[in-house]
Image (cartoon, grey):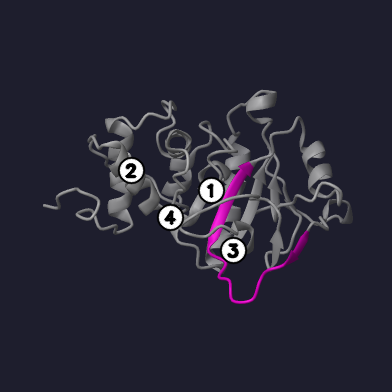
Amino acid sequence: MIRAEASRDYRSVNYDDRPDGVTLDVLVLHYTGMQSAEAALSRLCDPAARVSAHYLVDEDGTIFSLVPESKRAWHAGVSFWRGASDINSRSIGIEIVNPGHEFGYRPFPDSQMVTLIELAQGILDRHAIPPRNVVGHSDVAPRRKTDPGELFDWRRLAEAGIGLWPTVAEACGADAATVAAMLSAYGYETVDISRTVAAFQRHYRPELIDGEADAETVGRLRALLSIVGADMEALGFSVA
């Protein structure tokens, strides 16, 4: 059973109303990038910080509920996904306790992943969030963010019905313009292609993150586009 903390000490005031007519259809996962859970909770609940998330998942599996799902938490910042630029308005944000690349990035423990999966499954049961819209902070802000990063087990989430994973992907090449079109078709911004490719690799090809759209990276992107029903012929790929 999920443990949820609802202490007054850990209820953020950093939120506002979602705009009328906006569909809640994105789930954004972050790492805290701070030296402790206590430091992260303090910041997420500090009115002066003006940042928050709906939930925080500690390394031992404890969940802190910080902002009601019906409200807009302030977690994504300047962001973009599938044509939308106000991701906060249409998303739920989960902070996952991890010191991040700055303070000693490390694998996410099993206790944390098990609880995160249960929490995310519940969110997906309550809201019509397509698998393609389960994203990391780096996916929606590739020029600014690297979280939750290459050590986060996205494949495990996909196997639990949360998000997508290219289980069968044949390596293939594509020129720079086609790569940009493919990334855009999947949902990414393409202002800085190298950083966007790196963000894609952090999520879907964590073995090597170099910002280069090699054949393996393109193959995984093509596989994902096929899963979501993209027009592959329009992107320059023949369909057998």
- Dot 2: within a 10 Å radius of its alpha carbon, few (fewer than 14), some, or many (20 or more) residues? many
Q: Is residue 7 magenta?
A: no
**Residue shown at 33%/57% (left/top)?**
228
Q: CA distance from mark 2 to mark 1?
A: 16 Å
Q: For residue 81, which numbered disc appears in the image?
A: none
Disc 1 marks a residue whose amino acid type is: Val
**Residue shown at 58%/71% (left/top)?**
22
Residue at which label 3 appears: 90
Q: Is residue 27 magenta?
A: yes
Q: Earlier in the sequence, mark 4 or mark 3?
A: 3
- Dot 4: within a 10 Å radius of its alpha carbon, few (fewer than 14), some, or many (20 or more) residues? many
* Segment tinted magenta in the rendering: 15-30
**Residue shown at 70%/52% (left/top)?**
53
Q: Quadrant of residue 11?
A: bottom right
Q: CA distance from mark 1 to mark 3?
A: 13 Å
Q: For residue 221, which numbered disc appears in the image?
A: 2
Q: For residue 132, which numbered disc appears in the image?
A: 4
* Left or right side of 158 for 224: left
Q: Nearer the viewer, mark 4 or mark 3?
A: 3
Q: CA distance from mark 2 to mark 4?
A: 12 Å
Q: Position of residue 238 (x, y in %)?
A: 14, 50
Residue at which label 1 appears: 140
Look at the numbered discs 3 and 2 and tell me whether their residues touch, using CB distance below 8 Å: no
Label 2: element kind: helix
- Dot 3: within a 10 Å radius of its alpha carbon, few (fewer than 14), some, or many (20 or more) residues? many
